[in-house]
C-alpha cells in the first residue's frame, strides 16, 4: 500500500491529475522522486507550517488530542464527533460549511435520512469550500503516508501505545506528503476516491496543513503579523482566533470586527466582507471583543458559537435570519450598545456618540436640537422608542418574530446521554430585550446578536456551549 491509499487509487491519482507534484515531507514512502531542490523547499515549508501551528515545542497531550479524523455520529448521520477538547477550531468550521451545503440544496429534509455516502460527499465538499477560500494558484493537499501495519487499522481511530509515544509528532511530520492540484475539481475527486485521508486518525490535522500550505505559510504569517503566538495554544491546545478566522473566511486575521481598525497607531485587521458562515461569541458579552455585522449577519443562517474554551454550531432553516441588517436594525443595535443594562434608554449626553456610531448627522448644533426634542421633559434620558420613531419611523425587523434553531456540539460528554445529535429550540424575539442570564451561557451568547431573543429547547434545558 502506498501513502495509505490503495495501489489502484494511488496510480489512478497519478494518471488523472496533471502537474501533480508528490513530495515526501522527509523520508516518506515511495512514489515519483522529486528534485533535491523541490524536496528541500517542501521540507522547509512543512517545518515552517509546523512552527506556525505549534510553536517551537508541542506537548504530547496537545498533539494527541488533535490527532483524530472526521467521523460522524451514530445518532446523527451528518454530525461530526469531536473526541477530545482542542480540535473544535477545525471541526466546528467544517461542520458549519457541511450544514450550509446541506441546507442550501435540500431545505426541510429529514437529517436522519442521510446515507453515509451522502455524508461523506458533504464532508468532501465542505473541506473543498474551506480550501477554495485560500484563493490559491494551486491546492496543496497534505497526506499521511502509512506503513503497511498502520494501513491495516486505518478504519479505526484507536490510538496504540506506540502511537502515543513522545515521537508521535516527529513521526507524523516525517510521513507527510504533499500532493498539488491545479483545480478544486481535482481536489474533490482526489478526496472522494481517498476519503480515508480525512476520516483516518490524522484527518483533522491534515486539513489544517493543507489549508496553510495552499494559502502559503508566508501569506498566513503576514495576516497574523500582529501576533507572535502559535495558531494552536501550546499548553491548552485550543485554536486561536486567527485559526478560526482562517477556517471560516480564508484570512488568518486576529479580530472579529468589520474591516480594519486603527488602535494606538496600529492597523488591526478584521473581517473584510459578509461571510458565508457567521460567528458569535460569549466573549462579546464580557466585553473582550466586538463582533462586527459581517459575522453577525452571514449569507447563510449558520453561525459558529464560541464559549471561552469551545466552539459549537447554531443553524436554522429560516433563511430570513441570514438577511443583512436593515439600517434601522443596525441603529437599534448601536443604541442598545450604549444601554448595557437593557433599560431601553440612554443618557441624553450619549446621543452624539450614538448618532456618530450610527453614521447619522452628529454636528453639535443638530445633536443639541435632537436632544431637546427627544428629552422634552429634561429627564436626562432618551428612550429607544423615541429614538427609533424619530430616525427610523415605520422600520420593520428583517428577521421573523418566531423561528426554529438547531444546535450542534461535537463533544459526546456535552450532549445528554453522550449522544451527539442536533438539539432543537423554538425561538421568539420579544418586544423588550432580556437581561443577560449568568446561568444560561447559550442565551447570553445569542443575545449578542438578538438582544430580545428567548429560546425554549426540546428537553427544557439549554445546550452546552462547552
Image: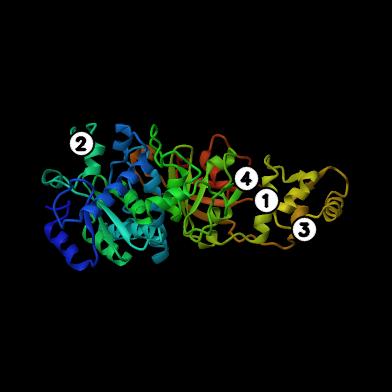
Looking at the image, tell me whether mark 2 or mark 1 is earlier in sequence order. 2
Few, some or many residues within 10 Å of mark 1 (<14, 14–19, 20+) = some
Q: Is residue 300 left or right of residue 171?
A: right
Q: Mark 1 or mark 4, which is nearer to you?
A: 4
Q: Is residue 398 above or below residue 90?
A: below
Q: Secondary structure at mark 3?
A: loop
Label 2 with label 1: CB-CB less than 8 Å: no
Give the colour scheme shown: rainbow
Estimate the x, y position of residue 17 in percent, counting from the top left: 23, 66
Looking at the image, tell me whether mark 1 or mark 3 is earlier in sequence order. 1
Q: Which residue is mark 1?
A: 334
Looking at the image, tell me whether mark 1 or mark 4 is earlier in sequence order. 4
Q: Which residue is mark 2?
A: 163
Q: Which residue is mark 3?
A: 361
Residue at position x 75%, y 44% from top?
A: 346
Q: Which residue is mark 4?
A: 265
Disc 1 to disc 3, C-alpha distance: 15 Å
Amino acid at each position: 500500500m502506498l501513502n495509505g491509499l490503495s495501489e489502484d487509487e494511488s496510480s489512478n491519482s497519478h494518471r488523472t491529475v496533471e502537474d501533480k507534484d508528490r513530495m515526501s515531507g522527509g523520508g516518506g514512502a515511495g512514489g515519483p522522486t522529486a528534485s533535491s531542490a523541490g524536496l528541500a523547499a517542501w521540507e522547509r515549508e512543512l517545518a515552517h507550517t509546523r512552527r506556525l501551528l505549534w510553536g517551537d515545542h508541542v506537548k504530547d497531550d496537545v498533539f494527541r488530542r488533535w490527532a483524530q479524523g472526521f467521523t460522524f455520529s451514530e445518532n446523527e448521520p451528518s454530525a461530526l464527533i469531536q473526541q477530545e477538547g482542542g480540535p473544535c477550531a477545525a471541526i466546528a468550521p467544517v461542520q458549519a460549511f457541511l450544514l450550509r451545503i446541506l441546507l442550501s440544496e435540500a431545505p426541510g429534509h429529514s437529517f436522519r435520512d442521510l446515507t453515509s455516502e451522502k455524508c461523506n460527499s458533504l464532508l468532501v465538499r465542505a473541506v473543498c469550500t474551506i480550501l477554495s477560500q485560500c484563493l490559491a494558484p494551486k491546492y496543496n493537499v497534505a497526506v499521511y503516508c502509512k506503513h503497511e501495519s498502520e494501513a491495516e487499522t486505518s478504519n479505526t481511530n484507536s490510538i496504540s501505545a506506540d502511537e502515543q509515544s513522545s515521537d508521535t509528532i516527529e513521526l507524523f511530520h516525517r510521513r507527510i506528503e504533499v500532493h498539488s492540484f491545479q483545480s478544486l475539481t481535482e481536489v474533490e475527486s482526489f478526496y472522494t476516491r481517498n476519503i480515508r485521508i480525512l476520516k483516518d486518525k490524522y484527518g483533522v490535522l491534515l486539513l489544517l496543513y493543507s489549508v496553510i500550505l495552499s494559502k502559503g505559510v508566508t501569506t498566513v504569517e503576514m495576516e497574523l503579523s500582529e501576533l507572535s503566538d502559535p495558531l494552536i495554544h501550546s499548553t491548552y491546545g485550543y485554536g486561536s482566533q486567527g485559526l478560526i478566522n482562517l477556517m471560516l473566511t480564508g484570512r488568518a486575521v486576529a479580530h472579529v470586527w468589520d474591516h480594519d481598525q486603527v488602535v494606538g497607531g496600529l492597523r488591526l485587521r478584521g473581517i473584510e466582507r459578509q461571510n458565508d458562515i457567521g460567528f458569535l461569541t460569549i466573549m462579546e458579552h464580557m466585553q473582550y471583543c466586538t463582533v462586527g455585522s459581517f459575522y453577525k449577519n452571514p449569507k447563510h443562517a449558520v453561525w459558529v458559537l464560541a464559549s471561552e474554551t469551545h466552539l459549537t454550531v447554531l443553524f436554522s432553516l429560516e433563511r430570513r435570519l441570514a438577511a443583512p441588517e436593515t439600517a434601522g436594525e443596525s441603529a437599534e443595535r448601536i443604541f442598545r450598545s450604549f444601554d448595557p443594562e437593557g433599560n431601553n434608554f440612554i443618557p441624553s449626553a450619549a446621543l452624539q456618540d450614538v448618532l456618530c456610531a450610527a453614521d447619522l448627522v452628529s454636528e453639535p448644533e443638530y445633536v443639541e436640537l435632537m436632544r431637546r426634542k427627544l428629552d422634552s421633559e429634561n429627564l436626562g434620558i432618551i428612550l429607544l422608542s423615541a429614538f427609533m420613531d424619530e430616525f427610523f419611523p415605520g422600520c420593520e425587523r428583517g428577521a421573523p418574530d418566531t423561528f426554529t434553531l438547531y444546535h450542534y456540539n461535537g463533544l459526546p460528554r456535552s450532549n445528554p446521554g453522550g449522544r451527539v445529535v442536533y438539539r432543537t429550540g423554538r425561538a421568539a424575539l420579544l418586544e423588550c430585550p432580556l437581561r443577560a442570564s449568568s446561568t444560561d451561557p447559550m442565551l447570553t451568547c445569542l443575545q449578542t446578536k438578538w438582544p430580545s431573543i428567548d429560546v425554549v429547547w426540546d428537553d427544557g434545558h439549554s445546550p452546552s456551549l462547552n
